[in-house]
Image (cartoon, rainbow, N blue to C red):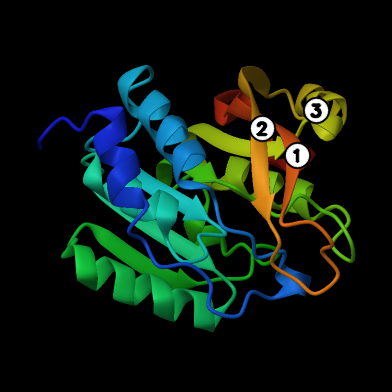
Amino acid sequence: MKKLKLKELESCIQQVDDFENPKLLLEQYPTRPHIAACMLYTIHNTFDDIENKVVADLGCGCGVLSIGSAMLGAGLCVGFDVDADALEIFRRNAEEFELTNIDIVQFNVCSLPDRLSKTFDTVIMNPPFGTKHNKGMDMAFLKTALQMARTVVYSLHKTSTRQHIQKKADEWKVKMDVLAELRYDLPASYKFHKKKFASIRICFLNLNPKVVVLGDL
């Protein structure tokens, strides 16, 4: 597998088609190419948690993080999302890049089958932030991710929720590290958005579920 430089990875990710008609109830916002590239590059080069690993992309949308993981040499990357329309765009993206180490599954994050527990080496995600009508959805994603991962979860969350996530991590006996503080320039995607961009402070988290007692989640 060719070693991609950060700029090369970001350039590839910029070519991934995004949501055609984003759905507010699912909080469908694109992961910005620069953030996605930096996130994946760090996971790959600093922690060696992508190459030859079985990776899950939870709430994958149109597949930005899955495609980036596949390009970095994931043994297999499986994208999970509840929205069939987003998964169709993802399928087209994967075909366009001619990637064979990707699978796509329609999946409700709140209904984890037992067969998926501890199935993946690494779970990578940019979950809904739990705003508007989705309060608590960010934690539902995190709970499922920790159940699915054998080794580690990497996730993006609003900085304002960091203390709450740390409290839950302590309750779940999960080790949590903040890898970076970032600015998420969110483009106007819905009619109620008044500005072209909104800048949101987010944190890039690393959570180790190996000491999780699943019954406590």
Task: Give the residue displayed 59% in from the left and 47% down from the top.
Answer: 126
Position of residue 152 in the picture relative to residue 160 (left or right): left
CB under 8 Å between discs 1 and 2? yes
Q: Amino acid at mark 3?
A: Arg
Residue where numbered disc 2 is placed = 183
Q: Amino acid at mark 1?
A: Ile
Q: Could you tell me how far apart the alpha carbons at marks 3 and 1 are, in whole angstroms?
A: 13 Å
Q: Which of marks 2 and 1 precedes in the sequence?
A: 2
Residue where numbered disc 3 is placed = 162
- Residue 167 in percent (x, y) is at 85, 25
Task: Give the residue displayed 26% in from the left and 43% down from the top.
Answer: 74
Q: Secondary structure at mark 1?
A: strand
- Residue 49 is drawn in which quadrant? top left
Task: Give the residue displayed 60% in from the left and 80% down from the top.
Answer: 21
Q: Secondary structure at mark 2?
A: strand
Residue where numbered disc 1 is placed = 200
Q: Could you tell me how far apart the alpha carbons at marks 3 and 2 are, in whole angstroms?
A: 15 Å
Q: Could you tell me how far apart the alpha carbons at marks 1 and 2 are, in whole angstroms?
A: 6 Å
**Residue closest to the eye, 216 or 198:** 198
Please identify, in this view, whether the residue under mark 3 or under mark 1 is nearer the observer: 1
Q: Which of marks 1 and 3 precedes in the sequence?
A: 3
**Residue closest to the eye, 212 or 160:** 160
Q: Amino acid at mark 2?
A: Arg
Position of residue 154 in the picture relative to residue 183 (left or right): left
- Residue 159 in percent (x, y) is at 78, 30
- Residue 47 in percent (x, y) is at 38, 19
Q: Is residue 157 above or below residue 186?
A: above
Task: Give the residue displayed 20% in from the left and 63% down from the top.
Answer: 97
Please identify, in this view, whether the residue under mark 3 or under mark 2 is nearer the observer: 2
